[in-house]
Image: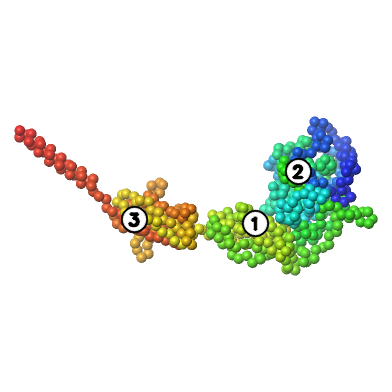
Amino acid sequence: MAVQFGRRLRRGATTTAVAAAAVAALSASQGPGSPLVASEDDQPAAGATPSDDSAASGNSPYFTDLPPLNTPNKPGTSVDLPVTGSAESGIPASILAAYKKTQQTVAGTDAACRLPWQLLAAIGKVESGQARGGRVDAQGTTFSPILGPALNGQGFALIKDTDDGAYDGDSTHDRAVGPMQFIPSTWETWGQDGNGDGRKDPNNIYDAALAAGRYLCAGSRDLSLATNLDQAVLSYNHSDEYLRTVRSWFEYYRRGTHEVPDGSGVLPSGLGSGTDRNPSSGRPGTTASPTPSPSPSPHGSTTPKPPSKPSPTPSDPGGKPTYPPPTPEPTPSQTLAGVKNAGTGPLTATAGDAFTERIKVRAQNGLGGPLAKVSVTFAVTGDTDAAFTGGKRTVILTTGADGTVTAPVLKAGEKTGEFAVRATATGTSLPGVSYSATVTARQADTITRTGTEKLTAEAGATFDDVAFKAMYKKAAAHGVAVTATMITDDEKPTENDKGPYFEEKDGKQVRTLTDLTTDADGKLVLSKIHAGDTAGTYKLRLTTEGGATVDIELTVEAATDAGTEAGTGAGTEGGTDTGTEAGAEAGA
């Protein structure tokens, strides 16, 4: 959501007329084929706005400074000029690099969008004056958060808090955040990691520029078409005046620009160069001086557009605008020094269970005291399927009056082993704290056979199914690993290579099974125990994860020879009868 500032604050038709005149002057030198100028067929109807009119930008202010009427360079020359040219055409090095990197990244994943980096530069200029003239660190993160005003419905849209103050430090209403000014709810959807540091930080120009690029390319837009470009810009801020201002800068940058050192960019009217608070302070929204803010929201959705910037302050007695007001340097008691462990104990849990210990941190100021309203990010890291309540691996919360904040309940997954949870002050590189957590396998402290009948089978046959139940602390032990082994009847049993056996799928005989697990009721059924060929009494031992064991006897009886005896008797009897009958016939 965009924001106007100082004496450049929107003033109805007067400012609109100035903007329109400037656009007309810039457009006069363009040929009919220019991608900036819409043809009669492509030009949106007067007053046209996107169908999604929720929030309607909340009359959010934004920078309306227009580019000089003289272009940076003659038409048709390279847009990658050396470090020369008008001051307004200079873009801070890190900011320019972020825009160009975004163009390349989007071209590799959504080439049909044809996103020009100059469009990002135009929006960045209008929204935050190119991150306050390029006041960013080596990683591209602003020295202090760029925050818009509270979207409390008083001159702006009414957007109640959606992030518990995690991004904007305001737990009552949302505010636009960062050099491209996203409201928290939109950042949650469109946030990107543009600099590959594993984080999505709206205060980082690489992250914010890539998020803006993705947002502008939403749907099937082709930004080389004037109508699509208009739709994209209007989706960022539903204002025709905003569209005209962005288009003016877009064309200006298209005609040429050059790189200037970070921190030396030209600031919009009314925005001084000394309004950032101490870079070491990481408390978003507390003492940060307000700055421009964009208002993107998911294309085509009814989600409120990103908040705008703080309302302008009164002029000084001489009539000169004083926005934004100077912000005093924070004292040590106001400066965030980092976060520390606030008494969290060992983190251990059985697979599938919740950790009983809750992670708690304390934000400290430069004097070692507590600091309230500090945004803290808790992130689960490592090879694990553990997560916070709701399946989230990352949550952002704000410290209370005592400087502490407690993470949601952490639940172990099925993957055993160690992992870590990292707690850091959101959007800063200040010292954080890492917690080691361990997930142990499900266990049972007892396992018993559920039947009492003697287990017998003839040699060569199979035993009836044998059932067991595992318990842990007098409750059914679900999902516990069990090992079944045919053992010798020695003082120190080993695997028995004789007698009953199990059979694998390929028909191979084995006397140990290790892939057994109890069901939801703690039950386990062994089927297809082959008796083997040798009669005798044998032992089967079941051992659970956790060390519970049970031994049962398997009796193999010799096979009866009934078939052989029957065959022999029949042959003898038959032979006798046949011989007698044959002799009688011969005598006759």
Q: Amino acid at mark 1?
A: Ala
Q: Could you tell me the amino acid type at mark 3?
A: Glu
**Residue furthest top as drawn:** 41
Quick one: which residue is furthest to the left in this view?
587
The residue labelled by disc 2 is 54
Q: For the residue labelled by badge 2, is the local secondary structure a helix, a strand or a loop?
A: loop
In this picture, is 490 found above or below 44? below
Q: Amino acid at mark 2?
A: Ser
Q: Residue at x 71, y 64 (%)?
A: 403
Neighbour tally class for label 2: few under 14, some 14-19, many 20 plus, Cα within 10 Å: some
Answer with mark 3 or mark 1, whichever residue precedes in sequence.
1
- Residue identified by numbered label 3: 453
Q: In 3D space, how far apart are the residues under numbered discs 1 and 2 (Cα atoms)?
A: 33 Å
Q: Nearer the viewer, mark 1 or mark 2?
A: 2
Q: Where is residue 163 shown, x and y percent of the image? A: 71, 53
Q: Nearer the viewer, residue 576 or 149?
A: 149
State which tag comes first along the sequence, 1 or 2.
2
On the image, which quarter does residue 363 sit in?
Answer: bottom right
- Classify residue 263 as left or right of residue 345: right
Residue 181 in sight: no
Mark 3 → mark 2, Cα distance in angstroms: 74 Å
Neighbour class for label 3 at 10 Å: few (<14), some, many (≥20)? few
Residue beneath disc 1: 379
Q: Earlier in the sequence, mark 3 or mark 2?
A: 2
Q: Nearer the viewer, residue 451 or 326?
A: 451
Residue 522 horizontal/vertical position (percent): 46, 55
Identify the residue shown where x is 4% and y is 35%: 587
Q: Quadrant of residue 105?
A: top right
Residue at figure coordinates x 67%, y 53% from the top left:
198
